Each structure stands twice: as C-alpha cells, then as structure tokens.
Image (spheres, grey):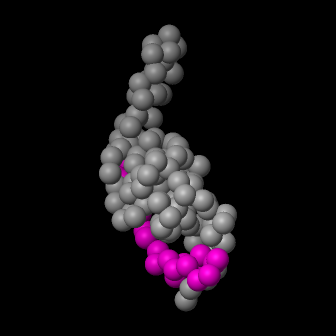
Amino acid sequence: MFVEVAKTKEITVGNMKHVKAEEYEILIANVDGNYYAVSDRCGHMSASLSLGRLDGNIVTCPLHSSEFDVTTGKLISGPVLESLPEIECLPEEYKKLNRERRKLIEATNTYDLIIYELKVESDKILVKI
Ligand code: FES
C-alpha cells in the first residue's frame, strides 16, 4: 500500500527529510529532481541518516561516516573511525576504553539500506510500505 509521506516542495533538490510511515522510519532524498526512499536507519548501528549529510546521491552517516547510495541503498564505504590526537593526552583507562569502543564498532557489520518504492502524484510523495 502506498502512503503519502511528504509534499514535493518540502524536499528541494539536494536535500533530504526524515518521514514516518506507520512504524517505518524513512529517508526521502531529492537527487537532481528525482526522489528516492531508503531506510532512515544506518546499516551499521542504526543512527538516523537524515541527520547526516547528502552530497549528490551519497548520504553520510553522522555517527561513523559510513556512506550509502540513496538511489540503490548500497553501502559505498565505512564506517570510518577517526583517531583523535587529544586521546593520547587522556589517562590510560580512557585510552583502553576507547580501544574497546573501536573494536566494538569495527566488529559490527554494516548492511545495505532497505529501499522503498516511491511515486509522485501531483505534489504528493508516496512510498509503498
Ligand atoms: S551508525 Fe552509521 S556508520 Fe555507524
């Protein structure tokens, strides 16, 4: 079943928006005037991708910088774990904690995004759920 999730004017070219359709959290992206719908949960650790950055057809996760193609849902790269030089100034127990955190993040698989069928009718964006 298709449900209306937004009006076209709400998502201009190069922008994206979080919408909810029933229990599904969906990201709608406008890439060069075409709309795409993917899960708004990162395939790594479920961060909200709509809080990240959209550059062309690539959305970057705000948490660990995984990149996904919003036109296909495919993982392009990541996650990326930045090494902060300030960490070297911290006590050993914090450094150890940080190493454990990195191991956990690296050990977590990253999956492609679910894609949703989308159609535009007049000024309405509808997704199939
Ligand atoms: S939650 Fe998105 S890259 Fe980790």
Q: Which residues are magenta?
A: 108-129
Residue in the foreground of this view, choosing between 97 and 64:
64
Residue in the foreground of this view, choosing between 18 and 93:
18
Residue in the foreground of this view, choosing between 86 and 57:
57
Magenta highlight on residue 118:
yes
Task: Place residue 127 in its image quadrant.
Answer: bottom right
In the rendered image, the vertical position of residue 84 relative to residue 110, given as above or below: above
Q: Is residue 45 visible?
A: no
The residue sitting at the top extreme is 89
Q: List x then y, in percent, for residue 77.
A: 33, 46
In the rendered image, the vertical position of residue 14 relative to residue 104, given as above or below: below
Residue in the foreground of this view, choosing between 80 and 102:
80
Looking at the rendered structure, the number of numbered marks drawn on it comes to 0
In the rendered image, the vertical position of residue 81 relative to residue 79, given as above or below: above
Q: Is residue 90 visible?
A: yes
The residue sitting at the bottom extreme is 1
Magenta highlight on residue 122:
yes
Write the residue at 34% across / 55% down. 75
Write the residue at 44% across / 52% down. 56
Write the residue at 32% across / 51% down. 76
Q: List x then y, in percent, for residue 28.
A: 55, 65
Q: List x then y, in percent, for residue 45.
A: 47, 51
Write the residue at 55% across / 89% down. 1
Residue 122 relative to residue 117: left or right: right
